[in-house]
Image: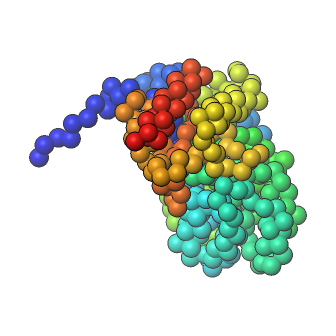
């Protein structure tokens, strides 16, 4: 059988993807270290320092956990650990990853009450209140903080305020927002928020992280049938007693996350978040100058990814392929809007001059495709 030939080690594409993203150089350098036991004193120190840094970043004194997983693994854990068997979850859906959350709810024997909104728009707060009034027996509300398919950032603070007024659990998918958008876990009274390493933190994939409220942790402790691998209370106990994880953690990724959190600390959290805001604004401004339309409702644009309407009659995937020929890896449209959109991510190690070069090439590609 012939080996597949591709030059993965020397690929030179500039990444403007939805993730994985271009990793920061200091992250890659730190991850080159020789391995050590995840039961060693060295790992314990690394683990607990990383927990402390995440606690600082998320502004919480509650439980932080690390998982050898993608973010979707913790999405499933939120349901299996904190919602009763057959229990109802109000799932707010503004795009493809809200739809995924609903699928996860249903596939784990719980009931998803779907609250769907027009793609490109955020959760409507009045409709959220109406749904909570109509479904007093729901146990939790699931929210996608930043919808990667549509490039919309939900108003999480306002959503949280409403959910807590109704005394419901709040689960937040922050996979493409954590590290680029502000999350105040304690102040907003979130119950579970989760993310993963390969997005705004600019670390390779394989590591997920979550913050849990005391109530969520207690629900996990008493929940039956939650499985072994994503037993949140088990993770909490092992971390408390062994300063580690129940199974082997992705040590290189944890080293990388540790390094990037220290970089954020040294830069200043809000200076870091402002960096992401300025990047996304630079891309949106450039896209408008080319004459393209943005998919997200104005005022709710993502700080990490921009979803763009492709010109009429041009499949978004063609723009992706043409940009790839020029050395730029963008992201294809996703879900039901796959053919009419394409996406530009701005996570990880990206410089302003990279953005300007990408936009120059995008303009040329659009002009060429329109002239065919």
Q: Is residue 271 above or below residue 150?
A: above
Between 331 and 163, the residue placed more toward the observer is 331
Colour convention of the picture:
rainbow
* Residue 213 visible somewhere in the drawing: no
Query: Residue 9 at what x, y percent from top left?
Result: 32, 28
Residue at 74%, 47% in the rendered image: 298
Residue 309 located left or right of residue 185: left
Residue 290 located left or right of residue 40: right
Between 278 and 89, the residue placed more toward the observer is 278
Q: Is residue 140 above or below residue 9?
A: below
Residue 311 located left or right of residue 221: left
Residue at 46%, 49% in the rendered image: 314
Residue at 74%, 35% in the rendered image: 56
Q: Quadrant of residue 60?
A: top right
Between 266 and 288, the residue placed more toward the observer is 288
Query: Residue 248 at what x, y percent from top left?
Result: 45, 45
Residue 43 located left or right of residue 49: left
Query: Residue 32 at what x, y percent from top left?
Result: 42, 24
From this viewpoint, which residue is outermost toward the right? 165
Q: Is residue 26 above or below residue 131?
A: above
Q: How many labels sit on residues?
A: 0
Q: Is residue 331 above or below residue 234?
A: above
* Residue 32 visible somewhere in the drawing: yes
From this viewpoint, which residue is outermost toward the front? 371
Query: Residue 4 at what x, y percent from top left?
Result: 21, 41
Q: Quadrant of the C terminus?
A: top left
Residue at 78%, 51% in the rendered image: 155
From this viewpoint, which residue is outermost toward the left? 1
């Amino acid at each position: 059988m012939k080996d597949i030939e591709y030059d993965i080690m020397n690929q030179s594409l500039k990444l403007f993807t939805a993730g994985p993203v271009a990793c920061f150089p200091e992250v890659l350098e730190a991850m080159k270290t020789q391995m050590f036991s995840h039961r060693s004193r060295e790992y314990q120190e690394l683990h607990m320092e990383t927990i402390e840094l995440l606690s600082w970043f998320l502004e919480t004194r509650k439980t932080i956990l690390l998982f050898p997983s993608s973010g979707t693994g913790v999405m499933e854990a939120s349901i299996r650990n904190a919602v009763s068997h057959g229990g109802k979850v109000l799932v707010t859906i503004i795009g493809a990853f809200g739809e995924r959350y609903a699928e996860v709810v249903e596939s784990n024997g719980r009931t998803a009450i779907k609250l769907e909104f027009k793609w490109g728009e955020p959760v409507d707060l009045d409709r959220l209140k109406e749904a909570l009034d109509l479904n007093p027996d729901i146990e939790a509300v699931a929210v996608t903080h930043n919808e990667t398919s549509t490039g919309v950032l939900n108003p999480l603070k306002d959503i949280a305020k409403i959910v807590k007024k109704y005394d419901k659990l709040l689960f937040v998918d922050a996979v493409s927002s954590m590290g680029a958008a502000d999350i105040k876990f304690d102040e907003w009274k979130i119950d579970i928020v989760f993310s993963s390493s390969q997005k705004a933190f600019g670390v390779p994939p394989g590591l997920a992280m979550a913050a849990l409220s005391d109530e969520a942790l207690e629900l996990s402790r008493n929940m039956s049938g939650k499985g072994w691998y994503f037993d949140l209370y088990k993770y909490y106990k092992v971390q408390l007693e062994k300063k580690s994880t129940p199974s082997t953690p992705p040590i290189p990724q944890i080293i990388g996350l540790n390094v990037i959190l220290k970089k954020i600390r040294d830069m200043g959290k809000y200076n870091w978040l402002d960096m992401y805001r300025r990047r996304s604004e630079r891309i949106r401004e450039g896209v408008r100058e080319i004459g393209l339309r943005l998919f997200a409702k104005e005022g709710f644009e993502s700080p990490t990814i921009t979803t763009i309407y492709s010109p009429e009659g041009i499949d978004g995937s063609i723009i992706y392929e043409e940009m790839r020929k020029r050395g730029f890896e963008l992201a294809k449209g996703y879900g039901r809007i796959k053919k009419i959109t394409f996406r530009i991510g701005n996570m990880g190690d990206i410089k302003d001059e990279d953005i300007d070069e990408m936009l120059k090439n995008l303009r040329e590609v659009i002009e060429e495709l329109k002239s065919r």
